[in-house]
Image: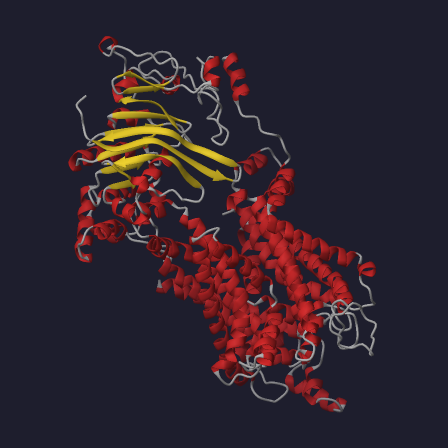
Amino acid sequence: MNNTTNTATSQTLPVYKKRGQGAEIWRRFRQNKNAMVGMCIFLVLVSFALFAEFIAPYDPIEQDLLNIMQTPSRQHILGTDELGRDIFSRIVYGSRISMTVGLIAVGIAFVAGSALGVICGYYGGILDNVIMRFVDILMSIPAILLNISIVAALGTGLQNVMIAIGISNVPRFCRIIRASVMSLREQEFVEASRAAGAKDLYIVMRHIIPNCLAPLIIQATVSIGSSILQCASLSFIGLGIVPPTPEWGAMLSTGRDFLRKAPHLTTFPGLAIMAAVYAMNLMGDGLRDALDPKLKN
Amino acid sequence: MSQQEKLLEIKNLTVHYATVDGTVRAVENLNLSVDAGQTLGLVGETGAGKTTTVKTIMRILPVPPSIIKNGEILYKGEDLLKKSQKEMRSIRGEKISMIFQDPMTSLNPVLTVGDQIKEAIELHTKVNKRKAFELAGDMLETVGIKRDRANDYPHQFSGGMKQRVVIAMALACNPELLIADEPTTALDVTIQAQVLELMKRLKVQYNTSMIMITHDLGIVAEICDYVAIMYAGEVVEYGTREDVFLRAQHPYTKGLFTCIPDMYSDDNRLIPIRGLMPDPSNLPSGCKFHTRCDYKCERCEKEEPSVVEVSSGHYVKCFFALPQNVASSKVSVKMPV
Amino acid sequence: MIKYILRRILMMIPVMLGVTIIVFTMMYITPGDPAEIILEDGATPEAVAELREEMGLDDPYLVRYFRFVSDLLHGDLGTCYAIGQPVFDRLVQTFPNTMKLAALAVLVSTTLGLLMGIISAAKQYSVFDNVAMALAMMGNAMPNFWQGLLLMLLFSLWLGWLPASGFSSFKHMILPAVTMGTSSAAIIARMTRSSMLEVIRADYISTARAKGQVEYRVILRHALKNALIPVVTIIGIQFGRQLGGAVLTESIFAIPGVGKMMVDAIKARNFPVVQGGVLMIALSLSIVNLLVDILYAYIDPRIKSQYK
């Protein structure tokens, strides 16, 4: 064709700075003040979890019966509990439990839910029907009740709590990925790949999973927060992590007996739970806006 | 041209949007007028500021992002930009009404079409509900839909039928000015023709003036008396249909015509206008078209050209516009349709 | 429409059957011998063996499951180990309390959430919008049980305005309902806002304005009804959350509802009561979901025409 026109076109086109997709998402995420606040809180909690030994001024389990239920002071910045243990140290160590539960429970749900979702969405048919009915059944029991039933069956303790919360989060991941896969399956680039003779597993890993990552990441972020909350709820009614392990919900539960005399026993662990959930929600919102600018209002 | 009453006159209108990425200069120093009973075609690419202009006339642009910097919109001599929202409400729908681009989205899916047509009637006339509903039925019949379908919901109509409903809705109060924002773009070609025919007929029947936004020059040729070509928020050429179609002077207008296939010509090659519309938050200096213009000179990059009246009522915003003797230029040129 | 409802009710049967399998299996694998639990400490091994025989605890899994389901179909949910009362009777006593509480909580959260969401969307980026959305974000993150304790501390222990526990008057319901409703209100407010903002940008809203319609009528008549569909879904989900959240709230405020009954029963390994409670809540949840789907048809004529 006309050569001069072509070069002229390329010259007049506005030049955009080339940037990787990841960098672009990070730029958008960074500009979101709320998301950055969320990330700061999250990082604080993560460093609590990783370096609890260095950050906590006291042993979280050692009792000091001479100094029980002290209000916040210079020695104990958040006071002491009914057995004289330093509340701040217990919250710092509690972060380790909460973060572990959050990450592992969501990890279980993420892997199991995505696998089921891909199978349902990609193959459809009877298998899809059976799995989805099972998911419906799981969803017809409120998460907390499902958690309670599973923990009752398996017994309390960190590992079982993580399994219980993981299982009750599976349906949500399964549904999200199934919906994305079903719409992606009909897209032309997938059909083109299939026409080119690609195997199913290759198509799923190469074309389908990367394209439904955005909703999955957002869901995972928010789910970490809700898993922390669920773990605290279980411990609160005595079916999760049991004392003397410093878990936020369990701390609240014992603090409840001293509500009138020493309200700080309940206030601070509750604030910690809230901060964790709040941080994850803020980050989830920020990620949603950064990953899918169309959704932003 | 006889001295007709100017129904609507836009003077020096400038509208900006404040966005995160900076100020978007959507409309700059725009001048336009519509005479009573006439149809003005507003032509330009997507993003040229056509819709912003007409939404400003209606005063329905969302106010925080958009700022009306400057200008007047005189409707029968009164400045619409100075009116309160309450005063505007009695003008909208009654004196000036608007048809939006996509009939699929401009009807509310959860209300019956009868309800939506009668809404304007109830707002602007003092008739009771039953009478209003009856009038809505009349309007449906006017646009060729049986009146007993007034109780149906929009999803029960086809695209073309929906646009008829939208037209009925806009004409329900017999407005003096109808603004149609690409009313046929979303429709099939055969349906387009029917809807255009209907609009032409109703325009004559109700003696309505019209502003027709389009990027289809065929529609302009068929229905418009005057044409304004918009580029990057400005009118670059304005005149009667004949002026613009036969004696176009602005390079952009000329470019638009060479983009259309010509049935009568053996040369089937289309010459596209090279490049893209400039980013409205970062407009070039001088003449805004110079980045894409084949005739540009140094002056175009530095200085903004002023508007030249090349013949009576025919305005061109270009340094190379040549005033001409109207009588001598009656060359017969095919109308590209 | 009636046909659709009937079909939906039929579809509930397999789901409920699935719930029975899950509930039964969970209790089946739960450690602890019911016979020993009933007879308490100090029972002779012979007595325990006799009771096991009587209760059919030595039968295989499937036999026991089918016995469980057939009893269920006869309205027999088993007998409470602790007080020997039929579980059905215990549910009759406790379930209305939970329902009352959940309904009140949904009422509180829907009213508050819709109001906040609509105003925030109509006045996007205003001070109200910013404050309301910051509050919603906090409310969403606040653990129910913690908030319940703080409310109790403030209104019962310090101010003495409202009772801290029990369930004998409307006054007793206020704190628990607010506790349960807060986070739902936050979620509904956020959902309403974003749904409204999406709808407000639609052409038919511009069309309504172009007709000269008053702004509040544009919002209420044209936008709200369209924005309501995702919101109704969320409200339905929130109802389920309330029923689940009752477990915690009822424990805190000592309310004789299904939730407290179940928590107590789990600690005492009182399996039939737990089974009955979970089944009851799952059933109410399915009914709420059905009601939500029916509600869609009244909001959106497009959905109504699909229900055939």
Q: Is residue C75 above or below residue B332?
A: below
Estimate the x, y position of residue C260 in percent, counting from the top left.
59, 79
Q: Position of residue C188 (x, y in %)?
A: 49, 61
B12 and C200: which is toward the camera: B12
Q: Quadrant of residue A49?
A: bottom right
Q: Residue furthest top?
A: B328
Give C78 or B268, whichever is nearer the viewer. Answer: B268
Q: Quadrant of the C terminus of chain C?
A: bottom left
Q: Residue at x 58, y 61 (%)?
A: C138
Q: Is residue B40 above or below residue B97?
A: above
Residue C276 percent coordinates (x, y): 56, 78
Query: What residue is rendered at 60% in x and 44% in y?
Result: A31
Query: Is residue B30 rendered to the left or right of residue A87?
Result: left
Relative placement, left or right, of C237 versus C59 is left
The total of numbered circles placed on residues is: 0
Q: Is residue C120 above or below residue B184?
A: below
- Among the 4 quarters of the image, the one containing residue C30: bottom right
Quadrant for residue C151, please give it. Answer: bottom right
Which quadrant is home to the N terminus of chain C? bottom left
